[in-house]
Image (spheres, rainbow, N blue to C red):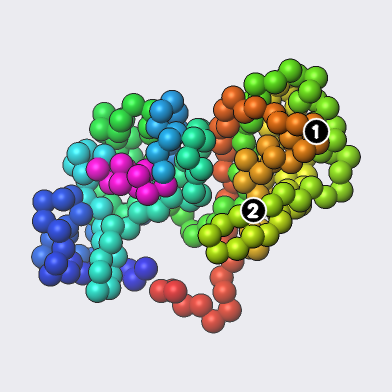
Amino acid sequence: MAAAIVAPVSAPFGTGWSRPDAAPSAASAVKIELRLAIRDRARYLSHLEMVDLLLAALRRAGYEVALSNGMRPRPVISLALARGVGIASEDERCTVELVGSDIDLDDLVERLRATCPRGVVPIEAGVAGARSIVAEATYCIEFDAPGDLVAQAVAGYHSATELAVPRRSPKQRRSIDVRRFAPELVLAGSAVTVAIAIFEDGSAKPEEVVRALSHCANGDLPVAGITRLAVRTVPNPARVGATENT
C-alpha cells in the first residue's frame, strides 16, 4: 500500500472510515496488529462477518479506519488466517490501519473490550512490524469419545506414511495428504494438539485431521470442539523485482 493516503470524493460520511479532506501525511495512519480471542457463540461468525464486526466495534470506539487507494476505496483491515465456522480461537490476528499519529494501544484495547460483542475478547495491540506470513497454526481438537479409542487413532495416524483425505469444492476435487502438513499429534486424554504447517502450495484443515483420525480409528470420532491455540508467523520474503508499493 502506498504511504500517502488521499481521501476519495466518494468516501463514506459518518461511518468512521472517512478521512479529512486534506491529503494526510504518511505519519497520519498507524498500522496496528490486534490479537483477540473468539469464544462461545462468536465462533460461529464467518470470516467476513468477523471483519464487519471489528469495523463496527472500532467505529463505536471512536476510531477511523484508513481507506485504501484506487477507484473503490475499502477499509484497510485484514485477518491473518481465515477461521472455519464453529472453530474457537485464542490467537486471532487482525491488522488494521487507523487514522491518527498517536494511538494509545492500551486505551485501544480497553475501548474495544467495551464495544465488541460477547465472545470477541481483545487481548493486546501493538504497532505492526514488517510484513509477515502465517507459517503454522496450532489447534486443540477435543473428541467426545473414549480416551483409548482416540489413543488408538493417534497411534494409527503416526504409523501411517501418508493419510490422504478428499477435499471437494465447487470447482475441483482433489486429495490432501494430511500427514504432510501435520506430521505429529500430541495426545492428552480425549483431546489432541496438532500444529498444521502452511506452505506456499496449501495446507490442511483441522477437520481434515479429524477425518484422517477417524479413518485410523475405523469409525467416526465425534468432535466436542476445536480451538485454535496459536498462530506462528515468519517474515514475508521479498520477491525479486518487488518495489515498496507491491
Q: Does the image show residue 154? A: no
On the image, numbered disc 2 is attached to which residue? 167
Residue 136 visible here: yes
Please report the residue visible at 37 percent of the width from the left and 49 percent of the height from the top: 48
Residue 62, compared with residue 166, is above or below; it is above
Camera-side residue of 81 and 24: 81
Provide residue 182's location: percent of width, then percent of height. Answer: 73, 45
Cα–Cα span, label 1 and label 2: 19 Å
**Apparent side of residue 193 relative to residue 96 in the rendered image (left or right):** right
Do labels 1 and 2 touch, CB within 8 Å? Answer: no
Residue 170 image position (x, y, % from top left): 53, 60
Callout 1 secondary element = loop
What residue is disc 1 on? 218
All told, the count of numbered labels is 2
Answer above or below: position of 205 versus 145: below
Query: Of callouts 1 and 2, which one flags the residue occurring earlier in the amino acid sequence?
Result: 2
51 falls in the magenta region: yes
Percent coordinates x, y for residue 218 in the rendering: 80, 33
- Segment tinted magenta in the rendering: 47-56
Q: Residue at x 41, y 28 (%)?
A: 41
* Quarter containing the C terminus: bottom left
Specify few, some or many for label 1: CA neighbours under 10 Å numbering under 14, 14-19, or 20 or more. few
Q: Nearer the viewer, residue 6 or 39?
A: 39
| Amino acid found under the numbered disc labelled 1 | Asn
Q: Nearest the camera: 98 or 40?
A: 40
Locate the N terminus and report the quarter of the image it occupies: bottom left
Give the quadrant of residue 116: top left
Q: Position of residue 15 (x, y in %)?
A: 16, 50
Front-lying residue, 72 or 90: 72
